């Protein structure tokens, strides 16, 4: 009986180990570059997103060529498997707005979308800079 229980525990462990490995969060550290579209803008907005881990916490900086987000600090960066969520604030002379971002990571590519508090949004595609 004792051998049967030990064998059952071993089989359970061996079957669960690969699943635990697959559930590992991705490493997003580095510089990511890409583009998105902004409503009423004449063309694509070039983006740079830089991630680093400090004291066990993810830090991020978001910039764009149109000047909406000039080194905006990313907040509440969360990684769940291959999905990254974060938000940051942009402002002009009149108002501040929060932008929410959800990205899916596949190797050296991030794809997803952004959405503003006002309901504007668009797709984002980023490539890891080497």
Image: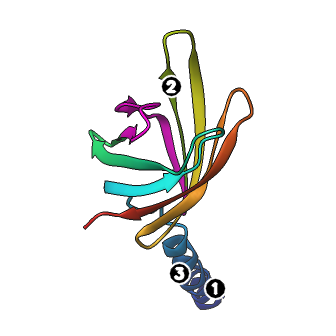
User: Residue at label 2?
Assistant: 89
Q: Nearer the viewer, mark 3 or mark 2?
A: 2
Where in the figure is residue 55, as x and y percent of width and height?
A: 27, 39
Q: Nearer the viewer, residue 27 or 124?
A: 124
In which quadrant of the rendered image does the C terminus lie?
A: bottom left
Q: Secondary structure at mark 3?
A: helix
Look at the image and tell me whether residue 29 can be seen. no
Q: Nearer the viewer, residue 23 or 94?
A: 94
Q: Counting other residues with Cα less than 10 Å from the Cα at mark 2, is it few (<14), some (14-19), or many (20 or more)? A: some
Q: What residue appears at the point 53 percent right and 71 percent down from the top-left corner?
A: 20
Above/below status of 19 relative to 35: below
Verify CB contact (< 8 Å) between mark 1 and mark 3: no
Closer to the camera in the image, 83 or 102: 102
Cα separation, mark 1 vs mark 3, equals 17 Å
Q: Which residues are magenta?
A: 61-83
Quarter holding residue 66: top left
SS type, badge 2:
strand
- Rendered residue at 39%/41% (across/down): 65
Q: Which residue is mark 3?
A: 18
Q: Which element type, helix, strand or loop, lies under badge 1?
A: helix
Tell me where residue 95 appears, x and y as whole percent: 57, 12
The answer to whether residue 88 shows anywhere in this view is yes
Mark 2 or mark 1: name the one nearer the start of the chain.
1
In x, y percent, where is residue 92? 49, 17
Look at the numbered discs 3 and 2 and tell me whether their residues touch, using CB distance below 8 Å.
no
Q: Which residue is mark 1?
A: 8
């Amino acid at each position: 009986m004792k051998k049967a229980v030990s064998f059952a525990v071993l089989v359970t462990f061996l079957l669960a180990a690969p699943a635990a490995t697959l559930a590992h969060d991705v490493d997003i550290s580095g510089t990511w570059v890409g583009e998105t579209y902004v409503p009423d803008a004449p063309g694509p907005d070039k983006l740079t997103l830089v991630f680093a881990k400090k004291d066990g916490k993810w830090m991020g900086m978001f910039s764009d060529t149109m000047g909406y987000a000039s080194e905006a600090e990313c907040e509440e960066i969360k990684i769940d498997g291959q999905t990254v969520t974060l938000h940051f604030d942009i402002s002009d002379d009149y108002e501040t707005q929060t932008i929410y971002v959800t990205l899916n990571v596949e190797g050296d590519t991030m794809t997803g979308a952004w959405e503003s508090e006002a309901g504007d949004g668009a797709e984002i595609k980023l490539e890891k800079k080497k």
